[in-house]
Amino acid sequence: MQNHRWLRTPAGTAPRISFGADYNPDQWPREVWDEDVRLMKAAGVDVVSVAIFSWAKLQPGPDTWDFDWLDELIDLLHANGIGVDLATATASPPPWLTTAHPEVLPVTADGTVLSQGGRQHWRPTSPVFREHALAIVTKLAERYGSHPGVVAWHVNNELGCHNAYDYSDDAARAFRVWLEERYGSIAGLNHAWGTAFWSQAYSAFDEILPPRVAAAFPNPTQQLDFLRFSSDALIDHLVAEREILNRISPDIPVTTNFMVVGETSHADFAKMAGEIDFVSNDHYVVEGRDELAFSAAITSGFARHRPWYLMEHSTSAVNWQPINRPKRPGELIRDSLTHVAHGADAVCYFQWRQSVAGAEKFHSAMVPHGGEDTRVFRDVVKLGGILQDLGDVVGSDRARADVAIVFDWESWRASELDSHPTEKLRYRREAFDWWTALTNAGIRVDVVPADTPLDGYRLAIAPVLYSAPTALRESLERYVEGGGHLVTTYFSGIVDENDHIWLGGYPGAFRDLLGVRVEEFRPLWEGEQVALSNGTTGTLWSEPVDVTAPDVEVLVRYEGEEELDAAVTRRPVGSGSAAYVSTRLGVEGIGALLPTLLDGAGVASELPEAIRGSVELVVREGANGRFEFLINRTDDEVDLGEGDYLCGSAILPARGVAVRRA
Ligand code: GAL
């Protein structure tokens, strides 16, 4: 994403926030297409993703191809001013391929071969799959690479959504090559994996397997490397497709849709972002409004705060949760505009027309089963109008905040491996609690990958920064020495890049910076709470913290616990500081601590006190000015005061969003 290339737009087109959906007309009779185009125009749709699951239709047999329908479709859309984000169609291989080549099917850790009949049943490392996938990519690029209606290439779909972890023999072979490149020698690998433990020493790379189901905990570094390798295998597939697209149609930007949502952690999206022209994300509401905003902010961090493409979200209910409720009035528009606030310059859904058959027929769409005379379609049309009014926002960046949460994919995955002090720790949950508490306090926050330079942020929060390679430790030290205010928590600074413990006491790599030392962790039982001196409580984790530097201030203490004393500490370092939180405070406990941390870092809310917490503020800034997005987090009306509103007005209704010039 070094150069950030956005959708190709025909010359003379006014900038606009693009609006559309996944469009699957190959699942419908031809006469429906004209009706679709009529409704798309009514809704202001200007872009659709096409052919995502069309491989079997485009290539009905090994040597037969059928592009006529796609020719006609792209021409029809183009003639009506609707751009095509053209998928490479490789997400779901057709049955003829898996019948002829069952060796492309993925294998689970216990040896189960996953069958055709669903979707994404392919091994990322299969040479046979790769060959067939690249053949169809080549055909599509040759045929449509200079079509003026194609505005972007959409590689595959949600890489790794169902097939991220494949334990097949193909995976084993590719894993060995990956390891050899990483470690250079078997001795290097044996050291990194700590194979002196449990008689695991390898004498050759050929002996190595993916961490298949074993008699006891598989080697943790082997597990971690397998997670890294599996993500790299997906990126390798992305790059293979992209290289063909770039070679044959260099003018069309390439993207692929990430899945920054909830607990999904299979791919290193920060790294993947480096391989595409603009970031795209798919998000579904899994834990409510704040999680949506948090995920959108993480996505913006991957996009380095440049505009990104919301490739999929839902107009209303999904179909894949245990119980699927529709959105409440206002939520369709609020959810979409929250993504725009966090940098989305395209707002698209899964999918355009709700399916009549198949596994997703109960998933909402822009045109529901009930047709155009429905609340959902009326809201879609309304949103299309609002997006047109936001033309000045297009191309602007998400403006930098004073506070950053460091969200480290590596620490996420490594801190949750098995055989740890507690299996209840959830990395993302801790980070999300800080996000929520800061939003409650009316503070804008960026969420950034661990390699982001932190200078310029007054306050950086790095919760559960378990994995602390030397370079990261040094960059955090420099940040604090340069006047930055760092907060980190329990289970931080624990290991290096090989998952080897930093010896001498916890929190290992950050012990000296923080001026504290911990000899033993003391995780809490489920339901157990520890009382804290500021009236809040800790859960999940606690530690007997020894203060080792004379200048360390104890901000909060454990109460009534024989073995515990300091709970939250802060050490001044020059004009900066380094604070340590040794228990899980939760949103409420963080909220109680925040005024001290914010004051210390010189951070203040930009919102009037009366609306702090009720409203989330996000700012975008670009050539046309600075724009404040004010999102109502409550079910009550909020008075924002007068202003120059592009959307909404001073009185923000329940679940409403207003946008005004700053
Ligand atoms: C995504 C996928 C779409 C559709 C959607 C339903 O994971 O890319 O094709 O299945 O979920 O929510």
Image (cartoon, rainbow, N blue to C red):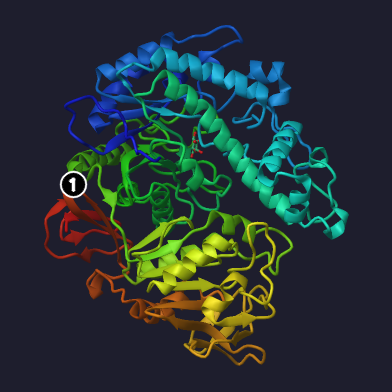
Image quadrant assignment for residue 21: top left
216 or 389, which is in the foreground? Answer: 216
In the rendered view, does 374 fall on the left or right side of 187? left
Q: Which residue matches tag 1?
A: 623
Q: Position of residue 252 (x, y in %)?
A: 36, 25
**Which residue reaches farthest right?**
199
Image quadrant assignment for residue 39: top left
User: In which quadrant will I find the C terminus?
Assistant: bottom left
In the rendered view, does 262 fall on the left or right side of 120? left
52 or 175, which is in the foreground? Answer: 175
Res 581 visible: no
The residue at 60%/62% (across/down) is 467
Q: Secondary structure at mark 1?
A: loop
The residue at 32%/14% (across/down) is 75
In the rendered view, does 96 fall on the left or right side of 253? right
Is residue 50 shown above or below 611?
Answer: above
Ligand 1 within 8 Å of the CB at mark 1: no
Q: Position of residue 624 (x, y in %)?
A: 16, 47
483 or 124, which is in the foreground? Answer: 483
Q: Position of residue 34 (x, y in %)?
A: 31, 17
Q: Position of residue 481 (x, y in %)?
A: 42, 74
Res 319 visible: yes
Residue type, mark 1 in image: Ala
Is residue 324 shown above or below 11?
Answer: below
400 or 618, which is in the foreground? Answer: 400
Image quadrant assignment for residue 135: top right
User: In which quadrant will I find the N terminus?
Assistant: top left
Is residue 643 shown above or below 255?
Answer: below
